[in-house]
Amino acid sequence: MERLTEQLVEARGKKGPDGSILLHSLQEYLGVVAALALQLRFFDLDTFKIRVMKRSMIKLGEEKKFEPLANYILHIPHLFGFTGDNYLPKYLEVEIKRRRQLSERNEQYDIVQFILDNPCLFDLNKIESIGYILSLLIHSGTTLLKVYLNKVFLDIALTPGVYEHLYQEQCHIIEEHGKKIELDILDKMEILDSTILESIRLSSHQEWLVRYLNKDFVLSNGVSLHKGTYVSFDMLGHTHNEKIFGKDPEKFNYKRFVRSGPMHQPLGDVSARNLLWGVGPRMCMGKDYSIAIMKLILSIHIRKYAIKPAFLGHKEGDTIHTFKIDKKPSFVYFIPQ
Ligand code: HEM
C-alpha cells in the first residue's frame, strides 16, 4: 500500500500543505492506482486469460475489431479521462522489452509477465495497442468506481452519526494495529464495509447485467424470452425486497450488513444480498481492486478529515479540500482535524 501511495505521488506529484495527496480528479487518481494495481497483481490474471480467449480477442493487438479502437484512443487520450500522459502503454513497452532480455523468468507474476507468458493471446509487435486496450478497461471500470465512491462519501457526509462511528472504528484499529494500512487491516474495517455496500445498494440501477439472447428461452414461470432481444435483471426491485434485505429496505442503514447483525454480508462475497459485482463467469474482474481502493481512500480520509456536506460543513477560516467529479467539485468537503 505504501508503495502504491509513493508511486501515486510520484506519478502526479501533487501534495497538499499537510503532506496529503490532493485529489484533483477522482477518476485520474483511480486510473493511476488501477494501473499500478495491475502491476501488483490485484486482478485475477487467470480469469482474465479465460475471458480473453472466450471472447476470441485472439492476439489482442492484431484483432481487426480492436485495432481501430486502440488507434482511436491513441489519438485522443484527453477524452479518456486522464490528463497528462497515459503512462501504461509506455510502461508495458519498456518493461516487456526489458524482461525479454533477461536470461531468467521474472519472479513477479503481474500483467507484464502474463502477456509474455501468453504469446498465443498477445501480439508482442503491437504492445502499444495492448496498453491502450488495457487503459480502456481501466477507464470503464474507474468511471463506475468514481461514481460509487462519490456516492459513499455523500452518504457519509449527509447522514448524521455515520462519520463519527466510522472515525471511532478507525481510532480503534489504530489503537490495536498501528497506523499502517495493509490489506488485512482493510478486512477489519467492518462498519466501513457495511457502509459501502449499503450506499451502493441504494444507488442500484433498474437494469443490471444486461444480456443479449442468441436463442429462445422459457423461464421456469412460463415466460418466453425471444432470440435477438435484450434482457436484464431488475436490480432496483431486488434491492428493495424486504425478504432479502430486512426491514425498511428503502432506508440508508449503514449497519445493515455488519458481522453481528442478522443480515451479515461482506462487500466482497457474492450472494443474493450482494449482486454488485455480478455473478458467474462474467463477474467483475476489478472486484478486489475496487474494494481495496474504496476502503483505502475512505479510511485515509476518515482518519484525517471531518467529512461534511458542502452546504453546512465548514466555518470561515477552515481549510477545505475537495475533489472533482466530471470537472465539477464534489459536494463533499474534507476539513482537516
Ligand atoms: C464499484 C466499482 C465497480 C462495480 C460495481 C463493478 C461491477 C461490475 C459488474 C456488475 C460486472 C459484470 C457485468 C455483467 O455481468 O454484465 C463487471 C464486470 C467487469 N468489471 Fe467491474 N465493477 C467495478 C469496477 C471495476 C474496475 C475499477 C475495473 C477495472 C479497473 C473493472 C473491470 C471489470 C471487467 C474487466 C469486467 C468484465 C467484463 C466482461 O467480462 O464482460 N470493474 N463489473
Image (cartoon, helix red, strand yellow):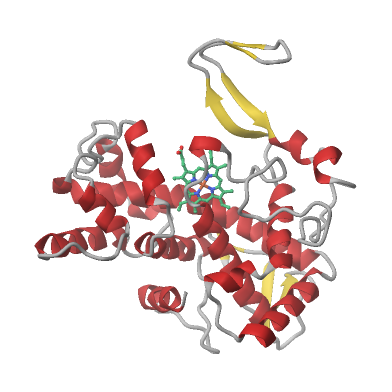
Image position, residue 156 (x, y; %): 74, 66
Above or below: residue 285 compared with residue 164: above
- Residue closest to the eye, 116 or 225: 116
Residue 240 visible? The answer is yes
Would you say residue 297 is visible in this rendering?
Answer: no
Quadrant in the picture for residue 329: bottom right
Where is residue 314 shown, x and y percent of the image? 75, 79
Relative to 274, residue 90 above or below: below
Q: Residue furthest right?
A: 247
Please name the residue shown 18% across and 43% down the image.
123
Quadrant assignment for the C terminus:
bottom right
Q: Position of residue 198 (x, y in %)?
A: 74, 54
Q: Is residue 88 left or right of residue 268?
A: left
Q: Residue at x 70, y 36 (%)?
A: 235
**Which residue is at the front of the view, 34 or 98?**
98
* Residue drawn 30% across the image and 34% down it: 57
Q: Position of residue 275 (x, y in %)?
A: 65, 42
Tally of numbered discs: 0
